[in-house]
Image: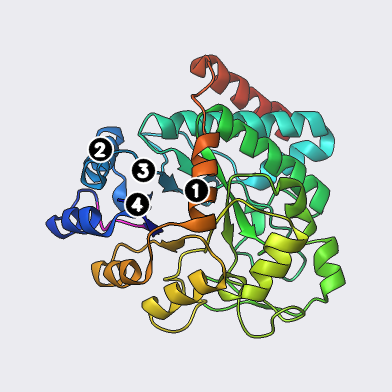
Amino acid sequence: MAPRAFISGLSGLTLTADERVFLREARPWGLILFKRNIEDKFQVTDLIGEALHELGGEAPVLVDQEGGRVQRLGPPHWPAYPPGAAYGRIYDRDPDAGLAAARLGARLIAADLIELGINVDCLPLADVPVAGADRVIGDRAYGETPAKVAAIAGAVAEGLAEGGVLPVLKHIPGHGRANADSHLKLPVVHADRATLEATDFAAFRPLKRLPLAMTAHVVFTAIDPVRPATTSATMIGEVIRGFIGFDGLLMGDDISMGALSGSIAERARASLAAGCDLVLHCNGKMDEMRAVAAEAPELAGDGKRRAEVALAVRKSPSGIDLAAARREFAAMMTERMA
């Protein structure tokens, strides 16, 4: 049977009996892990293995592993990685060195993930922050200009891909100008369309061929004054698929976030109707998971095509001397940040 058009979270460190039944019957396209699901390498590997067993084989397993403030796996079992802005500072001194550091950092993250069975990372960001915006993006961003952000984001995507991990471009078409944290409430951006196309949206255009992307829960009043990008057919059709030209697999950001209104079922229905291929639901609450599953059809049509293309892009990790690469990365960060 075909998977359903949603990605599901899990509640804790081990599968519950209800989750086992849910995974078998609901058939999500993929899973996403958070800190509540992560203790050590053996536990994570076992959790993923058990979940995939219930799904009947292979499935994408996602995580948000950026570095800095957003790092689900960390010390003592995994290295700490710098925030995106660190690569931007190196880039300002030496663009080639900045890109090399970003690529290698992502390659090392991929090595950490693939060892556990995690094969998709919600990275890179192409958000371009502006003065006065909410700090939810802040130092997660690679810089303040579209060209710089796109260049570093591209290097990060390359590093992940070299390590056998699919990148997820976020938060399309841009969260950098948002005046609120979309985890808590709905950001509304009043910039005119020409400004958005020259800055926020422009950073995503060079990255349009990446296999997966995640939308921003942000209203852009110049284009759709009511609905955030995740639930706006206008934003997805005219901007994400149109101006930016992204034709990869599109998921909304987590529909349980405070930016969206309505019931979980209504949110799921609205995001799919707007043009998202997948609903992303992260909090692991079983009643909400069932509501999402009830709204998510089997993946078909363009969504199925895009999913197949995305998964076909993933390749086996390239050979790497991890110990030497970690020493090289540490030296890059120490020397260039001094």
> Residue at image x 62%, y 20%?
328
Mark 2 and mark 4 in contact? Answer it, CB < 8 Å.
no
Would you place residue 334 above or below residue 224 in this image? above
Regarding residue 177, the answer to whether it shows in the image is: no
Dominant SS type (magenta): loop
Q: Secondary structure at mark 3?
A: loop
Q: CA distance from mark 3 to mark 4?
A: 12 Å
Would you place residue 297 above or below residue 158 in this image? below
Expressed as whole percent of the image width and height from the top left, the position of residue 19 reads 20, 57
Regarding residue 181, the answer to whether it shows in the image is: yes
Provide the residue designation for mark 3: 59
Q: Secondary structure at mark 1?
A: helix
The local crowd at label 3, few if under 14, some if 14 to 19, many if 20 or more residues have their Cα within 10 Å, is many
Q: CA distance from mark 3 to mark 2?
A: 11 Å
Expressed as whole percent of the image width and height from the top left, the position of residue 58 reads 33, 38
Q: CA distance from mark 3 to mark 1?
A: 11 Å
Residue in the foreground of this view, choosing between 280 and 112: 280
Residue in the foreground of this view, choosing between 31 and 310: 310
Provide the residue designation for mark 1: 307
Numbered range of the magenta stretch: 8-12
- Circle 3 or circle 4, nearest the eye: 4
Name the amino acid type tagged 1.
Ala
Q: Earlier in the sequence, mark 1 or mark 4?
A: 4
